[in-house]
Image (spheres, rainbow, N blue to C red):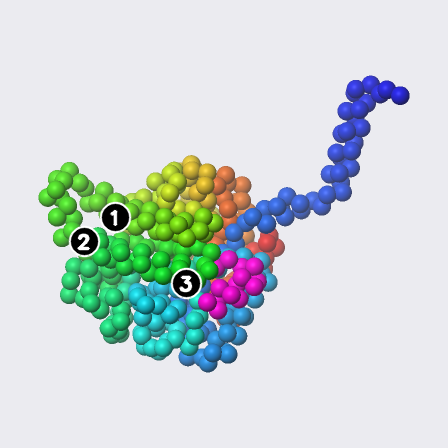
Amino acid sequence: MKYPSYKILLYILCALFLIYLIIPKDEEETLVEESEKRAVFVSYIELSKYVKGKEEAAIKNSIDDMLDNLKEFGFNMVLLQVRSFSDAIYPSSIFPSSKAVVEEEGDPLPFDLLDYFITEAHDRDLELHAWINPYRIRNNGDDSPIDDTNPAFSFMGTNKVGETERGLYYNPAEEEVEELILKGIEEILNNYEVDGIHFDDYFYPDDTIDQENYEAERRKNSELTLQEYRLGITTRLIQKTYRLVKKKGKDLLFGISPEGNIDNNYNSNYIDTKLFGREKGYVDYLMPQIYFGFLNETRPFQKTVEEWNQFITEESVLLIPALAFYKVGEIDNYAKSGAEEWILYHDIIMREVLASRSLSQYAGFSIFRYDFLFGDTLSEAAFLEKENLKKIL
């Protein structure tokens, strides 16, 4: 028996409709969830709180609890700060042990913390990325002695280290400093099964630290501007780091977390984020610190995240916005007329994730930082914000 073609088409449409009814309505959301990076920063501040001064068994229990909290909530990526001040939370032949996990810089580590973090994270199907601050040696106000095993110790009194308003920093323009940073990254890649390397905003220390270096370059090229010079230095470090990571494993990721204000990245931080977004060979992802609410008068979230997405034209470069859970329940003085947004509303982070998911280069989000989500003294506002975020994970 032959059916007219329009009847066959009708049967096909009916069949498709029945399939639509059978498939769960959240199937599309499930597909988003399977690929979405959901990261949390675990900083030296958390390490100092949950690790420092404890016995080995207690430390391991604390790490287990942290990773369990992340897994149960729905996160799948940990950004663990392994080197915050020219130091290390792992046994290193280059850097001394970190004061975040031992009493004094250079003291013996209780055990290999990074190895334990990686093993336990992977057991829970969590990615673990080694988070590094490449230039910082000491924060402003920290006058603790630098251990003689710290490479900064031998650099003191030379142009390789400088006192800045932010504290003691390596001079990015010095070739030996760049080599030191790269050797430190290579050490991690060779000894640990990390899923990637991560730099935070790694801002240029100040406007004078590399003055001698710049003047020397100007004698060779009088047309070279200070901005061009500094952008070239940070770009070179980024490119070399990317190559190191990819040499170790093509599936390993390298990303940076620059300031959310794109103009500041060029004019004061000297990070060529637009170059990294339009060309392959620099980063796998950009994780801009879009620490703004929707009502921020100067930098509203929606406009800012769309701006970041627009200049990422290289398909392989992913956008993973970093979100400011630390602002929940607080006055945001820099938001001007939107200063009270984080007090009045308790679903901002949730809405920021939802608003970002439709962007072409979106690959996930990250939260700064662990304790603002899982600390033992959460405010009512933080609790409500946390519950709303969980609804969409």
Q: Which residues are magenta?
A: 115-128
Instruction: Determine which residue is flagged by label 3.
Output: 191
Tell me the kind of residue under disc 3. Asn
Q: Is residue 122 magenta?
A: yes
Residue 306 % position (x, y): 45, 41
Going 51% across and 49% down the picture, which residue do you hit?
A: 364
Q: Which mark is residue 210?
A: 2
Going 52% across and 63% down the picture, which residue do you hit?
A: 121
Residue 368 % position (x, y): 45, 59
Mark 2: few/some/many CA within 10 Å (<14, 14-19, 20+): many
Tag nearer the camera, 1 or 2: 1
Residue 205 % position (x, y): 25, 56
Q: Earlier in the sequence, mark 3 or mark 1?
A: 3
Tag nearer the camera, 3 or 2: 3
Q: Check whether the beta carbons of the residues at disc 1 and disc 2 lie within 8 A of each other.
A: yes
Q: Secondary structure at mark 2?
A: loop
Residue 305 % position (x, y): 44, 44
Tell me the kind of residue under disc 1. Ile
Q: Which mark is residue 233?
A: 1
Going 38% across and 38% down the picture, which residue do you hit?
A: 279
Q: Looking at the rendering, in which quadrant would you find the N terminus?
A: top right
Q: Residue furthest toward the left?
A: 219
Q: Is residue 370 visible?
A: yes
Q: Secondary structure at mark 1?
A: helix
Q: Looking at the rendering, in which quadrant would you find the C terminus?
A: bottom right
Q: Is residue 295 magenta?
A: no
